[in-house]
Amino acid sequence: MLIHVLDLVGTFAFAISGAFRAVKYELDLLGVIVLAVATGIGGGIIRDILLGSLPPNALHNETYLLICLVGALIVFIAAPKIAVRWDFVMLADAVGLGVFTAIGAAQAELSGAGVFTVMIMAAMTACGGGVIRDLLVKEIPAILTSDFYATAALIGGGCFVLLRPLQWSPDARLACAIIVTLGLRLIAMRYGISLPKVKRLPASPSELTQIRKAAKKAPKISEQTSPPK
C-alpha cells in the first residue's frame, strides 16, 4: 500500500516537472498536458511494453493519467507560485525516482529478466519519461548531459538484484532500492555531483583524420621538392 502511494506521489512530481518544461517553451494547455503525461507515465509504459506486460499498467489504471492531468492543470494555473518552492518539487521527484527504480526492478525480475536487464528496466522506469519529455521539445535528454540521475537508478536497481541471494523479503529489497536511489540522488543534489564529461574535440573525427594524413604526406612532399646538395 505504501509503495502504491509513493508511486502516485512520484507520478505527480514527474508530471509537475514535465509540465514546467512546457512553461519554459511557452506551450499551450495541450502542450503542458502532453509533457506532464509523457514525463509522469512514459517510463512505466516503455518498461511494460519491453517486458510484454500489456496493456501497460498506467493505461490500465487511469488513476495515473488523472494525476498527470491534475499536475498539468496546477502548473498551467499556478506556475509562478510553484516555481518559488521548486526545492520541494525536486524532493518529491527524488522520492519518485527511488520508487520507480524499485518498481521497475521488481517488475523486470517477475518477468524472469537477467541481472543487467533488471538494472536497465529500473533506470528505464525512473528516467524514460524524462527522456521522452526532452525529445518532444528537441533537447538532448538531460540524463545524458548532466546530473547524477540515471546512475542513481542503475545503482539502486543493482542493489535490488544483489540482495536476492541473501533471501531478503521482497518488501525489504524494495525498501533498500528506494533508500539507496533516494540517498544517492539527494547527495548529488546537495553537493552538485555529476559524472565526468567527455571533452569537446577541436574538430570532427573525419577532419582530424584528414589533418593526420596531410601531416604524414607533408614531409615526403618536402623531401621530393628540396634541391640536391
Image (cartoon, rainbow, N blue to C red):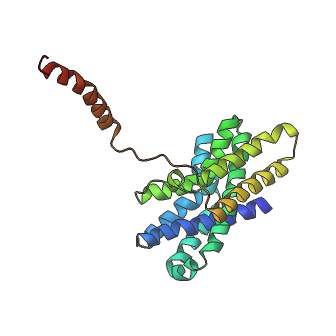
Q: Residue furthest top?
A: 228
Tell me the quarter of the image containing the C terminus: top left
> Which residue is at 63% across, 54% downward?
126
Could you tell me if residue 113 is visible in this image? no
Comparing 3 with 57, the one in front is 3
Q: Residue furthest front?
A: 229
Comparing 112 with 164, the one in front is 164
Comparing 138 with 104, the one in front is 138
Q: Left or right: 227 with respect to 212?
A: left
2 lies above or below 195: below
Could you tell me if residue 85 is visible in this image? yes
Name the spot of residue 101 as percent of width and height, x first: 68, 52
71 lies above or below 127: below
Q: Total number of numbered labels? A: 0
> Which residue is at 83% across, 47% downward?
170
Name the spot of residue 34 as percent of width and height, x first: 48, 64
Tell me the quarter of the image containing the N terminus: bottom right
Name the spot of residue 188 as percent of width and height, x first: 65, 59
30 lies above or below 193: below
> Which residue is at 80% across, 54% downward?
175
Q: Left or right: 38 with respect to 113?
A: left
> Which residue is at 61% across, 78% downward?
85
Q: Left or right: 164 with respect to 84?
A: right
